[in-house]
């Protein structure tokens, strides 16, 4: 038996309750209750009821265009005598309600809302885009930081492989007498071809090239010094060929001699063995050089002199061994042409390095570092390398000392040498390094070719 029947449930009492009259007597209707119409499709909204109760004598209600959601009265879009057609109250669904930032479908009856500057959903979408952009920016920043850490760590490894010498001051000339500039760094590149059992810094330097990194004019200038140039050698105390400075005063002796005779400040030197030269070229995948028939025959026909290297006539990529043999050619022409070949290969190396990807560039430096000896500190090397990276985007220029019209062949004490006008070469070298830009150098070269 059901539970409620045990408690005295009376079904007839329930029927009587259902038939009871629940209408509020008129004298007790204090709050103005009206019968409730549960058919939503037949009733009017509260706003429509207010409008109907407030129409004036012309049938016009100022609330017709009133927005009950915003408490604003927009401008009338119709004539005063054209009242809005009454809208039948539609059955309310979730899409009829405005949930703030949702993208709910707009109720057509509410389209007279005044235009806003920017809807809430658009603002949120803009913020979302901004957040996504910020996230991407952070990712790029993190990637760059990781890359910098890897490169910095790699640079530290490379720097540790270089051989460092203590820097020595030039005791033969004061710094005040030398031309210098904060935007220009001069590094003397010395190529030494020391044989087995020889002390490299006691041999005669085979190559002397001043590499000038010119930040002022955004270019790199390479100046070869001919080894047979007859100058005063401070470490000897008398005149001799320029390359004799290395055997008497070591690498610093060459720096002292060039500063003393030509008046330019040298920030430091870097000595490279010819074995390093081969490694450098091979790590870049070779360098492109135009080889003449005379040059190719000289190397190919003298296997003992050039370590059995062969060359072909034409423009093609040389391997490290081929490039070294090309730079060593000296029997077919003068020392002027020989140093020009060396500068040609050096320019090709710098050009290849400029277009190499970072990994190939790092591999080149990593493999070459053990063959480098310098008196520059790690900080100075990194500073000069950073400046050179910027200047490589510009032009590369090359010349030689002595300059054209400032020298002549001479025989001095039985030595076939190059006699020079020292002061004129000094002035021209200072002007070339510190004052001339790429356009100036191009004009001088054009005038020389005429």
Image (cartoon, rainbow, N blue to C red):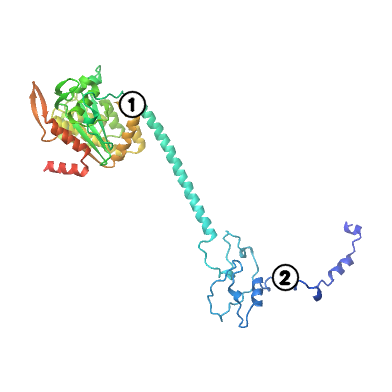
Task: Looking at the image, tell me whether mark 1 or mark 2 is earlier in sequence order.
Answer: 2
- Expressed as whole percent of the image width and height from the top left, the position of residue 373 reads 29, 25
Q: Nearer the viewer, residue 211 or 61?
A: 61
Residue 343 has which mark?
Answer: none
Secondary structure state at the residue bearing disc 2 = loop
Q: Nearer the viewer, residue 46 or 144?
A: 46
**Image vertical order of residue 174 relative to residue 53, above or below:** above
Q: Residue at x 57, y 66 (%)?
A: 106
Do the residues under discs 1 and 2 have CB atoms within 8 angstroms?
Answer: no
With 394 as the anchor, is 76 left or right in this view? right
Q: Residue at x 47, y 50 (%)?
A: 133
- Expressed as whole percent of the image width and height from the top left, the position of residue 394 reads 26, 42
Looking at the rendering, which quadrant does residue 412 occupy? top left
Residue 398 appears anywhere in the view: no
**Image vertical order of residue 203 relative to residue 180, above or below:** above
Q: Nearer the viewer, residue 313 or 61?
A: 61
- Expressed as whole percent of the image width and height from the top left, the position of residue 89 reads 64, 72
Residue 162 has which mark?
Answer: 1
- Expressed as whole percent of the image width and height from the top left, the position of residue 11 reads 88, 65
Nearer the viewer's eye, disc 1 or disc 2? 1
Q: Which residue is mark 2?
A: 38
Secondary structure state at the residue bearing disc 1 = loop
Task: Single out the residue that lies furthest toward the bottom.
Answer: 58
């Amino acid at each position: 038996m059901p539970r409620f029947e045990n408690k005295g449930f009376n079904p007839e009492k329930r029927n009587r309750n259902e038939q009871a009259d629940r209408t509020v007597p008129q004298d007790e209707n204090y709050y103005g209750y009206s019968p409730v119409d549960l058919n939503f499709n037949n009733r009017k909204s509260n706003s429509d009821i207010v409008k109907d109760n407030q129409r004036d004598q012309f049938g016009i209600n100022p609330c017709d265009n009133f927005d009950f959601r915003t408490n604003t009265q927009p401008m009338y879009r119709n004539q005063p005598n054209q009242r809005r057609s009454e809208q039948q109250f539609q059955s309310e669904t979730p899409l009829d309600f405005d949930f703030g930032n949702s993208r709910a479908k707009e109720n057509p009856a509410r389209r007279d809302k005044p235009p806003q500057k920017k809807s809430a959903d658009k603002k949120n979408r803009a913020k979302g885009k901004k957040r996504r952009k910020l996230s991407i920016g952070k990712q790029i920043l993190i990637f760059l930081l990781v890359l910098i850490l890897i490169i910095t760590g790699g640079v530290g490894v490379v720097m540790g492989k270089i051989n460092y010498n203590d820097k020595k001051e030039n005791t033969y000339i004061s710094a005040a007498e030398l031309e210098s500039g904060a935007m220009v760094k001069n590094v003397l590149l010395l190529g030494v071809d020391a044989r087995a059992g020889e002390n490299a810094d006691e041999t005669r330097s085979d190559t002397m090239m001043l590499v000038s990194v010119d930040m002022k004019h955004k270019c790199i200038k390479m100046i070869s010094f001919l080894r047979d140039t007859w100058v005063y050698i401070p470490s000897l105390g008398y005149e001799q060929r320029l390359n004799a400075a290395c055997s008497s005063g070591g690498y610093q002796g060459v720096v002292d001699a060039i500063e003393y005779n030509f008046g330019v400040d040298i920030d430091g030197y870097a000595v490279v063995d010819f074995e390093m030269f081969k490694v450098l070229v091979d790590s870049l995948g070779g360098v492109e050089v135009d080889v003449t028939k005379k040059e190719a025959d000289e190397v190919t026909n003298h296997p003992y002199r050039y370590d059995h290297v062969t060359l072909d006539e034409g423009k093609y990529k040389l391997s490290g061994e081929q490039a070294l043999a090309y730079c060593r050619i000296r029997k077919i022409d003068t020392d002027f042409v020989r140093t020009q070949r060396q500068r040609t290969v050096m320019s090709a190396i710098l050009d290849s390095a400029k277009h190499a990807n970072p990994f190939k560039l790092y591999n080149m430096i990593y493999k070459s570092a053990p063959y480098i000896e310098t008196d520059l500190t790690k900080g100075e090397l990194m500073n000069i390398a950073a400046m050179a990276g910027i200047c490589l985007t510009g032009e590369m220029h090359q010349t030689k000392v002595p300059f054209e019209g400032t020298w002549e062949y001479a025989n001095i004490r039985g030595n076939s040498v190059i006699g020079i006008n020292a002061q004129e070469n000094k002035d021209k070298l200072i002007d070339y390094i510190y004052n001339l830009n790429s356009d100036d150098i191009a004009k001088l070269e054009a005038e020389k070719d005429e």
